[in-house]
Image (cartoon, rainbow, N blue to C red):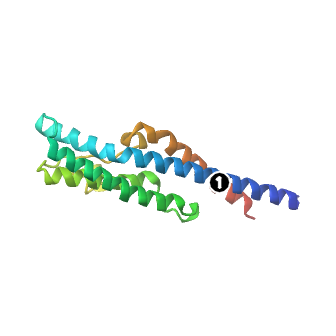
Amino acid sequence: MGDAADVGDAGDAAGAAEQLLAAYAEALIDAADAALGPWVERSVARRWADWTGSEPGPALRDASAEAGREAATVVVGRLRELLEADVDAQRTGPLAVLRRAVAYPTAVLRAAGVPPLVRDDFAERNFPDDDYDLSPATFADIDESLHEPGLVWGAAKAHVVLTRRRGRP
């Protein structure tokens, strides 16, 4: 049988786990903030080069840079909202939020007249607004710097959830 000290120790462990989760969330947010703008720019440049065989000109580079800044502001704001919410209130994950950034390079490419790609049924069904097949499958598809913070945050969230469940009667 546990006593009051055991309950206190469990509460301390849960609090420590939640503090670590918050720190890992902040690291993921910071990494996403640094990575999203350049990802938008690379995505536009890659699809432009695929279509034209050339590098984007100054106007397209400027448009993609502006879209990248907007993506970082809006999408990272949504990511922060998600990761600052209690784990029991989170109904999606950070990668799903980051995938919303696809709208930014897509808008630039559409405005530049780049035709949509032919995509497979899975991509059409699951990412209907991703005309250029840019949706990242993993954090590293956005930028390698997101891989570790994304995995660490996920493990820390799982630990918090399990700690909470074990502490309930």
Residue 100 falls in image quadrant: bottom left
> Can you give x and y, in whole percent of width and height, for residue 41 in the image?
27, 44
Whether residue 99 can be seen here: yes
Q: Which residue in the structure is indicated by mark 1?
A: 19
Secondary structure of the residue carrying tag 1 is helix
Q: Residue at x 49, y 45 (%)?
A: 150
Question: Of residues 155 and 56, which is closer to you in this image?
Answer: 56
> Can you give x and y, in whole percent of width and height, for residue 83 in the image?
51, 57
Q: Residue at x 32, y 43 (%)?
A: 38
Q: Residue at x 41, y 45 (%)?
A: 34
Structural crowding at the residue carrying mark 1, measured as other residues with C-alpha within 10 Å and reported as few (<14), some (14–19) or many (≥20) = some
> Can you give x and y, in whole percent of width and height, for residue 85 in the image?
54, 63
Quarter occupied by the C terminus? bottom right
> Can you give x and y, in whole percent of width and height, for residue 10 in the image?
77, 56
Quarter occupied by the N terminus? bottom right
Q: Residue furthest top?
A: 53
In the visual, does 141 lie left or right of 169?
Answer: left
In the visual, does 13 lie left or right of 66?
Answer: right
Q: Residue at x 47, y 58 (%)?
A: 80
In the visual, does 62 lie left or right of 79?
Answer: left
Mark 1 belongs to which amino acid?
Answer: Gln
